[in-house]
Structures are given as C-alpha cells and as structure tokens.
Amino acid sequence: MEFLYHLANASLTLRVVEHLHGSPWLSLRFITVIHQIDGWVVKVKLLHPLTETEEGNLRAYLNELGIPCEPDIRVRMALWGLETGQSPVDVMRRYQVAIVSHGQPDRTEIEEFRQQFVQGLGYCPETLA
C-alpha cells in the first residue's frame, strides 16, 4: 500500500514526516521526500495493508496537508529507481531530481536540505518555508 502526495512547503513536509514517525502502527517500508521548484513530493510505502478505518484516517490527514499527485515521468522513474535499490545519488544524477530523504522518516535531512538551499540562495523561497 502506498500514498503519493504533493505538499506546498517544507513545514508541511516536516509535519507529515513527524506524524508518520510517531505512528508505529503504520509499519512503514519507506518514505521518499523529493524537493521540486513548486513544492515537495512525498511517497509513503507501507509493509502491510491498513484497515479501511486506518487508511481513511491516514488519507484524511494527508489530504489536509497536501494533494494526491501523479508526478511527471522523471519523478516516477526516480521513485521507481529508489524502490528497486538504486542509490539516491545515482538516481539524482540520472533523473536530475532533488531527493532529500529516502528510507525511514528523518526530520534532520529535510531541515539540513532547507538550510543549505536557503544559504546558497541568500533568501528563503516559499516552498522552503
């Protein structure tokens, strides 16, 4: 079972990651976080199917913070590459996608990415707020 969402900014992405990290009943296989110019793509893959109620609750939470998405072919191929075990660095080079995190949810990776990106630009774009 998987969920694929587009989120507007880093704060919302961090909220999703924290929520998933604090929900051990979800049995996460992995979470992938990708930064794009217009926002963030978050893919959540679970080890086991959820009950109808659990799925509804998770989907409702994700719908409050983002929108379900069907990413372009480049992002889909990057997600597929990561899922098949390719290294994030190779996938980033091949598909020119900014993979911020892949695996277990990690708030620090997202915060470090945001800090380095803002430092390089000299200002904070809306998607990194």
Image (tube, grey):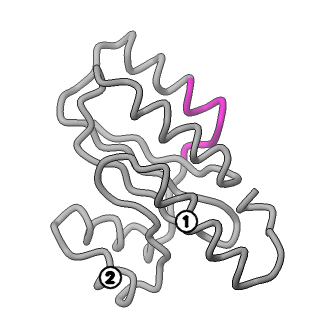
Residue 16 vs residue 37, the one in the foreground: 16
Quadrant location of the N terminus in the rendered image:
top left
Kind of residue at badge 2 = Val
Decide: is 79 above or below 86.
above
Q: Which mark is residue 112?
A: 1
Residue 69, image x, y percentages? 54, 51
Kind of residue at badge 1 = Glu
Q: Which residues are magenta?
A: 61-68
Which residue is pictured at 49% across the width and 27% down the height? 59
Disc nearest the viewer among 1 and 2:
1
Q: CA distance from mark 1 to mark 2?
A: 17 Å
Q: Mark 2 or mark 1, which is nearer the start of the sequence? A: 2
- Examine the structure image and report whether residue 67 is included in the region drawn in magenta: yes
Mark 2, residue position: 89
Residue 80, image x, y percentages? 27, 66
Q: Which mark is residue 99?
A: none
Residue 109 vs residue 31, the one in the foreground: 109
Secondary element under disc 2, as helix, strand or loop, is helix
Which residue is pictured at 83% across the width and 75% down the height? 123
Residues tagged 1 and 2 counted as in contact (Cβ below 8 A): no
Residue 113, image x, y percentages? 56, 68
